[in-house]
């Protein structure tokens, strides 16, 4: 969430930021709320000053044994007015907060300006794209032929966009989870296994609410949400906390199932594992000092890329433009893995710096030694990696002409096998 005072003092900057991001939000409502808030504050202050002056007068008159009943009655009326104004002040402050909760983050000055994904900028590529001497199959055909993925039974059990992993398919999913967690923890990330359900305050803290309510799976009684990513519970580990500067940076990694409605995606990736209501993911989350956050973003992205390099999967890394960035992000790198059957790169990780956007919502601060007060930390997160999409990339890139799939070398100790057949 953006700071109300910053928005108030930088209206033109906010308007330009919204324009770059493709938002048509009218700031006139915010300005109206601010004007009303300042008016209430002035009225309340004037009445309190009046009450203080008259209270002193009442005290003086009582010492003189004079009649103070009229003044006391006047102060009762003033007190009622102050209470009424304070209630209105709470209302207008809530209106301002609700408005700010729907305002996206400000893009970093290095983010390219653009309308949509067509204007993202490619930074680098890694790996050689394999030349096949046969027509490569889609992962769903490979999965069904090898009897390791069952889409029909997933739909029968629950509904569309649910899948059953079987045999070596299930084992490959588990191997990827363990490989990613082992690699991440070897780099200093602490492993977390958080709750898969969170409250609305936690969803609000990371920016999922109120903006993306339609994307979330909600439990009515009690009111909890199934997590769309481990970013939500892991970021909220330090909600309403003041950290010491020597504690930072803090690195976490977490494996969780993730649940998303995929509202508005119908007709896209109808077949296969790319867009499911339930998927598995390993997440990377960082809590860092504000001055370090962009160096940490580069390191975070490199850590996610390293997983693909060790799996020997070709990929490219792009910088998202202003019109394609996530709501809470100030800057995002997407890592896209090559899928031979589609002859295109597909997103497998998104690494973002939120600056203090999430920390302000979740009230996560840091106290610097020798300095007065506190400041909001910066939070970052990235997929390290989306397991289902990594499995897709392995099946398609490592498929053989005889229908088998070679298991990447780094996964063979986890699988106790070198081939799926």
Image (tube, rainbow, N blue to C red):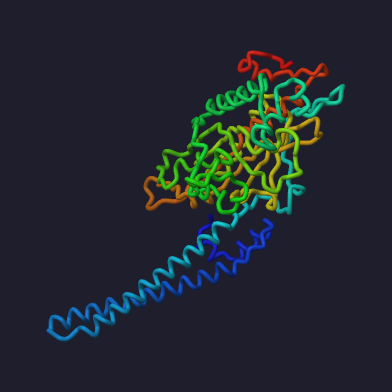
Residue furthest to the front: 156
Taking the image as shown, residue 150 lies to the left or right of residue 284, namely right
Which residue is nearer to you in this view: 167 or 50?
A: 167
Return the x and y of residue 314 as percentages of the image width and height. Answer: 74, 29
Residue 137 occupies which quadrant of the picture?
A: top right
Taking the image as shown, residue 258 lies to the left or right of residue 345, namely left
Residue 291 seen in the figure: no
Return the x and y of residue 141 as percentages of the image width and height. Answer: 78, 27
Above or below 185: residue 20: below
Return the x and y of residue 387 as percentages of the image width and height. Answer: 64, 30
Which residue is nearer to you in this view: 18 or 150?
A: 150
Residue drawn at (13%, 81%) of the image: 63
Residue 279 occupies which quadrant of the picture?
A: top right
Above or below 70: residue 195: above
Which residue is nearer to you in this view: 122 or 26?
A: 26
Residue 122 seen in the figure: yes
Above or below 43: residue 221: above
Return the x and y of residue 365 as percentages of the image width and height. Answer: 44, 48
How many tags in the picture?
0
Q: Quadrant of the C terminus?
A: top right
Residue drawn at (79%, 36%) of the image: 344
Residue drawn at (77%, 22%) of the image: 145
Residue drawn at (61%, 62%) of the image: 13
Taking the image as shown, residue 151 lies to the left or right of residue 15, namely right
Above or below 276: residue 178: above
């Amino acid at each position: 969430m953006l700071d109300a005072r910053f928005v108030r003092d930088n209206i033109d900057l906010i308007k330009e930021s919204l324009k770059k991001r493709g938002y048509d939000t009218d700031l006139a409502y915010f300005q109206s709320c601010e004007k009303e808030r300042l008016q209430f504050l002035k009225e309340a202050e004037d009445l309190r000053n009046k009450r203080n002056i008259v209270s002193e007068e009442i005290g003086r008159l009582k010492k003189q044994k004079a009649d103070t009943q009229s003044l006391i009655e006047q102060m009762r009326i003033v007190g009622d007015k102050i209470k009424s104004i304070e209630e209105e002040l709470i209302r207008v402050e809530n209106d301002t907060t609700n408005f700010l909760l729907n305002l996206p983050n400000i893009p970093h000055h290095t983010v390219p300006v653009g309308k949509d994904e067509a204007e993202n900028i490619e930074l680098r590529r890694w790996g050689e794209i394999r030349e096949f001497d046969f027509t490569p199959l889609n992962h769903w055909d490979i999965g069904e032929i090898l009897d390791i993925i069952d889409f029909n039974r997933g739909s029968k059990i629950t509904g569309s966009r649910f899948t059953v992993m079987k045999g070596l398919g299930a084992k490959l999913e588990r191997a990827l989870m363990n490989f990613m967690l082992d690699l991440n923890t070897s780099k200093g990330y602490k492993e977390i296994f958080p709750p898969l359900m969170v409250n609305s305050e936690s969803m609000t803290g990371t920016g999922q609410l109120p903006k993306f309510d339609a994307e979330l799976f909600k439990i009515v009684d009690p009111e909890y949400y199934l997590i769309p990513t481990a970013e939500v519970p892991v970021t909220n580990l330090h909600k309403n906390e003041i950290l010491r500067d020597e504690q930072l940076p803090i690195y976490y990694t977490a494996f969780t199932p993730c649940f998303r409605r995929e509202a508005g995606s119908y007709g896209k990736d109808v077949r296969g594992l790319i867009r499911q209501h339930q998927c598995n993911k390993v997440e990377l989350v960082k809590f860092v000092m504000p001055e370090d956050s962009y160096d940490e973003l580069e390191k975070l992205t490199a850590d996610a890329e390293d997983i693909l390099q060790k799996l020997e999967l070709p990929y490219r890394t792009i910088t998202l433009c202003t019109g394609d960035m996530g709501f809470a992000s100030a800057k995002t790198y997407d890592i896209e893995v090559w899928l031979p059957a589609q002859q295109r790169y597909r997103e497998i990780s998104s690494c973002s710096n939120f600056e203090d956007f999430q920390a302000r919502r979740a009230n996560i601060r840091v106290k610097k030694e020798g300095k007065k007060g506190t400041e909001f930390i910066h939070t970052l997160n990235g997929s390290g990696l989306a397991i289902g999409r990594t499995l897709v990339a392995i099946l398609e890139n490592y498929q053989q002409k005889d229908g088998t799939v070679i298991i990447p070398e780094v996964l063979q100790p986890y699988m106790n096998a070198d081939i799926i057949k």
